[in-house]
């Protein structure tokens, strides 16, 4: 395996600003479903920021945790897909092939991270908002599942640029929209197979932990706990 993409999230740095959420929506053509659909449990966001409260009033502190697809090496969403739309790529990504998906939603039921979303309707962007759509990302139609892809279009573009320059992909060449937009640099992306990459070193940090690690899903997103908890 040439690459094995992963991410590290420093919870000490995350301020809960949700710039990553806004950037992800813009980069990946994610529609806004509105308050009515959200009230029916049909909210759609490839990355969300969860809030946790510590302590008792008035000494209450708020902690934030960005949650996206964990790109599990033992992803429970993959074996339940009857059409192999949800599959493991040769670079360790939990990929989704939209034109194979028949919308059974088995994968969403199997995912313990609530990171998969069903398109209940065809997306619509009123003018002039349609002009801001990213041409590198497809528009998903009604009846399919979608999820975080670690901005696979940026991964492909980074590899193409490196190949054009006749060199290997370097650490920092590829940055997903969420990591690029983070003002506190809480999100770090890179190749876990590169022992010198920043994400690889952070993944080995004693502060590191995995979300719902006891389930055995082998996620590739490492959360760095606050130093007071390390």
Image (cartoon, rainbow, N blue to C red):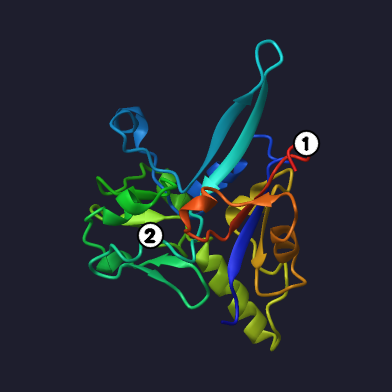
* Residue occupying the far top of the picture: 58
Residue 138 image position (x, y, % from top left): 38, 62
**Residue behind mark 2:** 76
Residue 174 image position (x, y, % from top left): 65, 67
Mark 1 burial class by Cα count in 10 Å: few <14, some 14-19, many 20+:
few
Q: Earlier in the sequence, mark 2 or mark 1?
A: 2
Residue nearest the observer in this picture, 159 or 165: 159
Q: Which quarter of the figure is the N terminus placed in?
A: bottom right
Contact check, label 2 and label 1, Cβ < 8 Å = no
Would residue 17 be visible to someone looking at this image? no
Point 72% across, 43% down: residue: 183
Quick check: 198 left or right of 4?
right
* Residue occupying the far bottom of the picture: 166
Point 64% across, 85% down: residue: 164
Q: Name the quadrant containing residue 62.
A: top right
Mark 2 burial class by Cα count in 10 Å: few <14, some 14-19, many 20+:
some
Quick check: 29 left or right of 210?
left
Residue 79 image position (x, y, % from top left): 32, 66
SS of the residue at dot 1?
A: loop
SS of the residue at dot 2?
A: loop
Gap in Å between the C-alphas at discs 2 and 1? 33 Å
Q: Name the disc covering residue 228, or none.
A: 1
Q: Which quarter of the figure is the C terminus placed in?
A: top right
Point 66% across, 66% down: residue: 190
Establish if 10 lies above or below 160. Answer: above
Q: Name the quadrant containing residue 198.
A: bottom right
Point 32% across, 45% down: residue: 124
């Amino acid at each position: 395996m040439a690459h094995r993409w992963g991410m590290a999230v420093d919870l000490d740095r995350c301020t809960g600003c949700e710039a990553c959420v806004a950037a992800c929506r813009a980069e990946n053509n994610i529609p806004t479903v509105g308050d009515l659909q959200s009230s029916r449990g049909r909210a759609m966001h490839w990355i969300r920021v969860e809030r946790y409260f510590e302590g008792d009033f008035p000494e209450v502190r708020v902690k934030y945790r960005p949650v996206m697809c964990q790109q599990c090496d033992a992803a429970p969403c993959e074996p339940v897909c009857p059409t192999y739309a949800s599959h493991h790529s040769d670079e360790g990504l939990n990929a989704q092939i939209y034109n194979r998906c028949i919308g059974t939603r088995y994968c969403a039921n199997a995912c313990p991270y609530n990171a998969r979303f069903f398109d209940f309707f065809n997306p619509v962007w009123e003018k002039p908002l349609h002009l801001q759509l990213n041409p590198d990302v497809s528009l998903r139609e009604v009846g399919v599942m979608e999820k975080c892809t670690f901005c696979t279009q940026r991964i492909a573009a980074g590899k193409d640029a490196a190949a054009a320059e006749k060199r290997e992909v370097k650490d920092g060449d590829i940055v997903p929209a969420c990591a690029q937009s983070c003002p506190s640099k809480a999100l770090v992306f890179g190749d876990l197979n590169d022992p010198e990459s920043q994400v690889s070193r952070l993944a080995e940090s004693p502060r590191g932990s995995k979300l719902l690690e006891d389930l055995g899903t082998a996620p590739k997103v490492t959360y760095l706990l606050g130093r007071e908890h390390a």
